[in-house]
Image: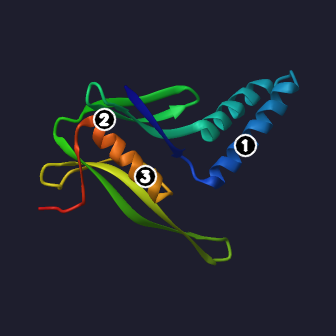
Amino acid sequence: MKSDYKGESVFPLMFIIIGITLLLCGIILLGTFDSRANVGIIVLFLGILVVFTRKGTIVDFKNQRIKHYIAILFLKFGKWKTLHEYSYVLLLRLNQKSYGYSHTGVQFTERKKIYRICLLNKNHRKRLNITDFKDKNKALSEAQGIAQNLKFEFVDYNPK
């Protein structure tokens, strides 16, 4: 059994807006059917790359392996890793904060709480991220399900 935890876009919102603009411009340039059609194909391709590139994680419970991937449309690129050195499942609560500046120099911040499901090795020093959730209850039930399917122990973070 495999579970696919689709993550967020690789690019931030500002780049996605630019990508949508590139998509529209590419379609318009393709519609002209003259010498600009070649440029339209390139612009359309760049827009597709920016808008539809996502990241995620696939967990194969049967074969005890994990794959972090980058997906472009329906193609997923990544390598499988075994989970033999991991034996615990963990739920972390993180406060993420990001900064940005406008052209006038005004700073803006974005804060959000996330709940991250991770795998831990025996001494809790090595961590492997699986997925993030915004809701604590969903994250807790999913972490317990992952622990049960992988036959790992669900623990609190405690480096030794």
Q: Residue at x 28, y 31 (%)?
A: 65
Q: Residue at x 67, y 37 (%)?
A: 47
Indicate left or right for 136 with 18 as reference: left
Dot 3: element:
helix
Residue at which label 1 appears? 20
Q: CA distance from mark 1 to mark 2?
A: 40 Å
Determine whether label 3 and label 1 are within 8 Å by CB.
no
Placement of the N terminus among the 4 image quadrants = top left
Label at residue 139? 3
Q: CA distance from mark 3 to mark 2?
A: 15 Å
Q: Amino acid at mark 1?
A: Ile
Closer to the camera in the image, 92 or 44 = 92
**Residue 24, position as x, y percentages in the image:** 79, 38
Q: CA distance from mark 3 to mark 1?
A: 32 Å
Indicate left or right for 24 with 142 as reference: right
Residue at which label 2 appears? 149
Residue 130 seen: no
Closer to the camera in the image, 158 or 30 = 158
Closer to the camera in the image, 57 or 99 = 57
Local packing at callout 2 (Cα closer than 10 Å; few below 14, some 14-19, many 20+) is some
- In the image, residue 136 sits, relative to residue 3, either above or below, namely below
Q: Amino acid at mark 2?
A: Asn
Placement of the C terminus among the 4 image quadrants = bottom left
Instruction: Give the mark nearer the N terminus: 1 vs 2.
Output: 1
Local packing at callout 1 (Cα closer than 10 Å; few below 14, some 14-19, many 20+) is some
